[in-house]
Image (cartoon, grey):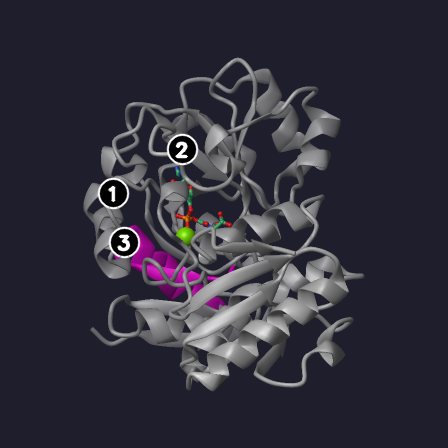
Amino acid sequence: METKLVRIENGDEESEKALQEAARILRTGGLVAFPTETVYGLGANAWDETAAGKIYAAKGRPSDNPLIVHISSIGELKPLVTNIPEVGRRLADAFWPGPLTMIFPKNGRVPDTTTGGLATVAVRMPGDAVARRLIALAGVPVAAPSANLSGRPSPTTAQHVWEDMKGRIEMILDGGPVGIGVESTIVDVSGTVPVLLRPGAVTLEMLKTVAKTVEIDAALGGKPDPDIRPKAPGMKYRHYAPKAELTLVEGEAGAVAAKINQLVKERMASGGRVGIICTEETRGNYPEGLLRSVGKRSQEETIAHNLFAVLRDFDDLQVDCIYSESFSREHLGYAIMNRLTKAAGYRMIYV
Ligand code: TXA
Ligand code: MG
């Protein structure tokens, strides 16, 4: 299959034509990758069992891992769910459109292929204008996981999508680099108390300003426990995995740098190609190794924004192992550390 890659600029005629074409592809059962404010998504008509099934094939994704259904206006929520709990309504008022996904009891019309056979459905109204325009033009809800091959870091540019999806899907809409860079926050509102399943840019602290109590899914605690089944099936896979072995080093900045430098020396002495993930504030601490700054500690949104691109960069550099600094788990740091510890397969060194 030939994959069309089209740049979308605000308001020009070519872009409008491309959006119309993309909407037609979605309506007729094809796959289109599109920008959102979090990461690029790989979309299909959520009502169409066959189309949703193609997503799993294109990504090489296990079919028990459900998709997020994207809508362009609040009216599109009702047909997807059996009811909208009060707290879900309040969270939607506060954070939609935006980087928040909510889990609702699903309407029987939503195909099992879309929801991985679950009795619930994940729904999100993205903040990105191109995404919402595409969904509105398609006239159907759009099921979309992140547009990466299963097991690779989520794509934050159309180039990343091209690397993973060329030849596998009909079209890629290039809306430039995404804003946020980590996937949406997921909250399950189908039970009595909202439960956080995946941290994101709508932070736990922000959720608590709207929903008095928010529980945290047991599976978010750290290393997967075989006795704890995550409520978001996708959270059990070793997602966001770079090809190299990644290890996080946590502690006071000076001690972290000393430990990383020691480990780098040892690995280089045995002939390894070694990468280091540091920050603008700490890059001067590392004399050797392939160094990548992921952003500024004083502006953690820059770290979220660059994280997956840095992991992909190290894949291209074909390093054998990567040592990374750690981050605070507050606010957006919770999402950053969640993705990093998963990418590291929970390999951590405390100094
Ligand atoms: O920011 C995002 O959410 C991006 C963009 C494209 O919107 N999408 C995304 O999708 O990250 P994906 O498929 O990579 O992650 C979806 C996560 C998976 O962990 C999946 O298991 C979980 O959502 N999920 C989907 N439906 C669910 C449900 N009914 N119950 C629990 N978890 C669900
Ligand atoms: Mg994903």
Between tags 2 and 3, which lies in front? Answer: 2
Residue 192 percent across, percent down from the top left: 53, 13
Report if the beta carbon of the residue with label 3 is closer than 8 angstroms to ligand 1.
Answer: no
Residue marked by disc 2: 230
Q: Residues within 10 Å of mark 3 (few under 14, many from 20)?
A: many
Residue marked by disc 3: 55
> In the image, which residues are magenta?
16-35
Q: Report if residue 24 lies within the magenta region.
A: yes
Residue marked by disc 1: 48
Distance of label 3 from label 1 (alpha carbons): 11 Å
Distance of label 2 from label 3 (alpha carbons): 22 Å
Can the viewer see residue 159 in this picture?
Answer: no
Mark 1–mark 2 CB contact (< 8 Å): no
Q: Secondary structure at mark 3?
A: helix
* Left or right: residue 285 compared with residue 173: right
Distance of label 1 from label 2 (alpha carbons): 27 Å
The C terminus appears in which quarter of the rendering? bottom right
Residue 262 percent across, percent down from the top left: 60, 74
Q: Report if residue 138 lies within the magenta region.
A: no
Which of the two labelled residues, at mark 2 and mark 3, occupies the earlier sequence position?
3
Residue under the image location 71 percent in, 28 percent down: 208
The N terminus appears in which quarter of the rendering? bottom left
Report if the beta carbon of the residue with label 2 is closer than 8 angstroms to ligand 1.
Answer: yes
Hey, what amino acid is under mark 1?
A: Asp
Viewer-nearest residue: 198 or 251: 251
Q: Is residue 122 above or below residue 317?
A: above
Residue 348 percent across, percent down from the top left: 53, 54
Which of the two labelled residues, at mark 3 and mark 1, occupies the earlier sequence position?
1
Residue 136 shows which numbered tag? none
Hey, what amino acid is under mark 2?
A: Pro
